[in-house]
Each structure stands twice: as C-alpha cells, then as structure tokens.
Image (cartoon, grey):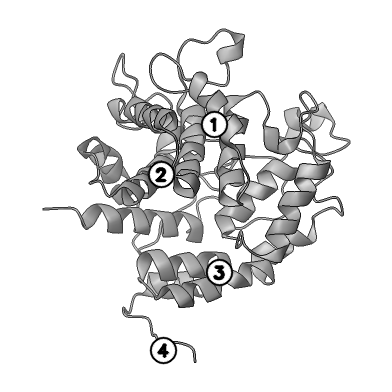
C-alpha cells in the first residue's frame, strides 16, 4: 500500500511548482517538502513516460543518439551558429537535460540509452567513443557528470581532468590554446562532473583534492568577482539562466555548493553570502524568480515560459538553495 502523505505547507509558489511537469514535481517533493523517498521516487519514475522527459526521449534516434551527432547535429551548417546561436539538440546536451529532469538511471530506457551511445556515438572532434570523452575540459566535465549519473565508468576522463587543472585551481577549455588562467564556466562544468563522480564512486584522493581546489577558485572570487579588481567578471554571471548548457551563473554555482556540502556533511562557506544576498534580491513579489536569459540556439522544445517571466526551474533551484543556506544560519 502506498504511504499516505500530503503537502505539509500551504504556499502558492509550491502549488505552482507542483502543478508543473514530473521533472519539477519530484525535486520539489524531495528538496523542498522532504517527502518520503518512496513517494518522490515514484514521481521521478514518471519522467520516463510523461512530460518533458518522455518528449525528449521521443526525439532519440534508433542508434541511441539525438540529432545524429555527439556535440553537433548532423548536417549542421556553421552559418546557423552565427545567425541563431549554438545548437543544443545533439546527444551530449540531450543527455545532460535528461539528467536534470531526473530520468531514473536504473530504468530500462536509461540503461539502453547508455549502451547504445557507447556503441554508436563518436565525438565530432576526433572520432573518440563517446564515453571515453572529448578533449575540451568543459565538454568532458559534463560527460563525467552524465556518465557518473547513468552508471558509466568515467574514471579515465576524471584522471585526465585532474591532470588538466590550472595553477590557480580551476579549469579552462582554452588551456590547449595557451590559456594559463581558469574560467568560471569551465570550472563549474568540471566541478559538477567531479562531484557526480564522487557521489557515484566515492572519488579518488586526487579527484577530491582537485575538486576542493576548484571550489576555492570560485569562493575566492565570491562566485562572480575578478580576483584582481573585485569587479564583476561578467555581469551576466548575476543573471539567472536556464537551461545552463555550458554557461555559468551564480545560481548554478550556489546549487553546486549546496549539493557538495550535503554530500560531505559540511556547512556552507561564508564566502557564498554575497551571491546569496543577490539571489534573495531577485525574488519577485509573487514569491517566484524570473528567467533573465537563456542561451540562443536550436532546441527540441522550451521548458520555461520565456525570458522575464517567472521560471519554475529557476524558482526550484533558488528555493532549495535558500532552504539549505537558511538551515545553517545561527
């Protein structure tokens, strides 16, 4: 018999989130409402067959890929990138979106997808098998995150990323072109991958050290400031973005630090407080948070109501970050 449970709070924003897609609902139940595991897992199981998850899976090719490409859709014309933005329909971005939706990695559909991609997908850059990784740290960070989530052995890619860390503690996908300084975007992509690897396997001593150094890179900069001048490194870092794709913003970083401290049992670092204050300031009068921007480019479908409108995805992440932060206030 199913366990009886009802929403323990009356909150119009929570009701609005629960009236959405299963991909949102199960995370609201787990992260905001502390629902019993059996109930949120039952809701998560619907991602396979209902809503956005099922819709994205319906676009999957017979060989397990999306858009017949690992990073770039088949037949892609570079003119499109210039005119309309980077396309987001190929395999790597579709997998990352399924991970965000919460497709159950133990489901038959997930296991079949992982196997087919391993057998059939090759990276555009050099023809490497998909689960062996590419060459850019940004791409490899997301591949580690996806692979670790879906139960793939990505330890070889992790070892490579550990060896590619910059002297300042972070990562930069322009390292191969001579860059000696890290970037916020590459660093958050790698950190998310290393955290997913640690959650799935326990990590290695080397991967744990590298992850802590990458965290320190962001924390020294209060998640958005230049270390040299104290100015915002990029004003867009303070804008709330979804889907993140490879992009960086403070909410993505805060959500990472929430997940990292929960895994390790640590308290939030006080250097996050400035970014937390900015996040609080962006809350709308109705209690939700807006979508400030989303990367342009080809998508299978949109999962938000548009720029400047209240966003369920941004609101979910903001609320769980603040719940975590406020739970540790003295």
Q: Earlier in the sequence, mark 4 or mark 1?
A: 4
Q: Secondary structure at mark 2?
A: helix
Query: What residue is rendered at 52% in x and 35% in y?
Result: 189
Q: Which residue is mark 3?
A: 44
The percent position of residue 188, horizontal first and vertical second, equals 46, 34
Rendered image quadrant of residue 156: top right
Mark 3 vs 2, N-terminal side: 3
Provide residue 40's location: percent of width, then percent of height: 48, 72
Camera-side mark, 1 or 3: 1
Residue named by callout 2: 256
- Tell me if 39 is positioned left or right of 139 in this view: left
Q: Of the residues under marks 1 and 3, which one precedes in the sequence? A: 3
The vertical placement of 268 against 323, above or below, is above
How far, Cα to Cα, is label 3 from label 2?
21 Å
Secondary structure, mark 4, is loop
Q: Secondary structure at mark 1?
A: helix
Q: What x and y, as percent, mark residue 280?
A: 29, 50
Picture quadrant of residue 142: top right
Residue that carries the numbered disc 1 in the rendered image: 158
Q: Residues within 10 Å of mark 3 (few under 14, many from 20)?
A: many
Name the residue nearer the viewer: 11 or 141: 141
Mark 3 lies on a secondary structure that is helix
- Location of mark 4 (residue): 4
Q: Nearer the viewer, mark 4 or mark 1?
A: 1
Alpha-carbon span between mark 4 and mark 1: 42 Å
Q: CA distance from mark 3 to mark 4?
A: 17 Å
Are the residues flagged by discs 3 and 2 in contact, CB closer than 8 Å? no
Instruction: Report the front residue among 80 and 196.
Output: 196
Viewer-closest of 120 and 189: 120
Foreground: disc 1 or disc 2: 1
Residue 308, disc:
none
Q: Is any part of residue 65 visible from this angle?
A: no
């Amino acid at each position: 018999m199913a366990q009886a449970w009802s929403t323990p709070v009356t909150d119009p924003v929570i009701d609005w989130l629960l009236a959405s897609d299963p991909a949102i609902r199960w995370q609201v139940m787990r992260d905001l409402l502390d629902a019993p595991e059996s109930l949120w897992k039952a809701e998560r199981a619907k991602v396979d067959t209902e809503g956005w998850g099922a819709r994205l899976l319906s676009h999957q090719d017979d060989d397990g890929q999306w858009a017949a490409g690992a990073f770039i859709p088949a037949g892609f014309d570079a003119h499109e990138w210039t005119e309309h933005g980077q396309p987001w329909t190929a395999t790597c971005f579709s997998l990352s979106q399924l991970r965000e939706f919460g497709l159950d990695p133990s489901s038959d559909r997930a296991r079949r997808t992982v196997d087919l991609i391993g057998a059939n997908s090759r990276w555009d850059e050099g023809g490497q098998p998909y689960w062996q990784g590419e060459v850019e740290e940004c791409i490899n960070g997301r591949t580690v995150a996806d692979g670790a989530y879906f139960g793939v052995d990505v330890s070889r890619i992790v070892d490579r990323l550990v060896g590619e860390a910059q002297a300042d503690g972070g990562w930069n996908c322009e390292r191969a072109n001579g860059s000696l300084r890290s970037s916020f975007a590459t660093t958050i992509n790698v950190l998310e991958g290393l955290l997913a690897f640690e959650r799935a396997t326990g990590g290695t001593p080397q991967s744990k050290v590298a992850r802590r150094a990458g965290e320190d890179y962001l924390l020294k900069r209060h998640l958005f400031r230049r270390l040299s001048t104290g100015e915002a490194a990029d004003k867009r870092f303070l804008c709330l973005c979804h889907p993140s794709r490879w992009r960086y913003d403070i909410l993505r970083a805060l959500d990472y630090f929430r997940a990292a401290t929960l895994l390790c049992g640590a308290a939030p670092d006080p250097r996050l407080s400035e970014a937390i204050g900015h996040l609080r300031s962006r809350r709308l009068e109705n209690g939700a948070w807006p979508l400030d921007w989303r990367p342009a480019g080809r998508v299978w479908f949109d999962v938000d109501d548009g720029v400047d409108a209240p966003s369920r995805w941004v609101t979910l992440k903001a609320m769980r970050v603040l719940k975590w932060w406020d739970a540790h206030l003295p």
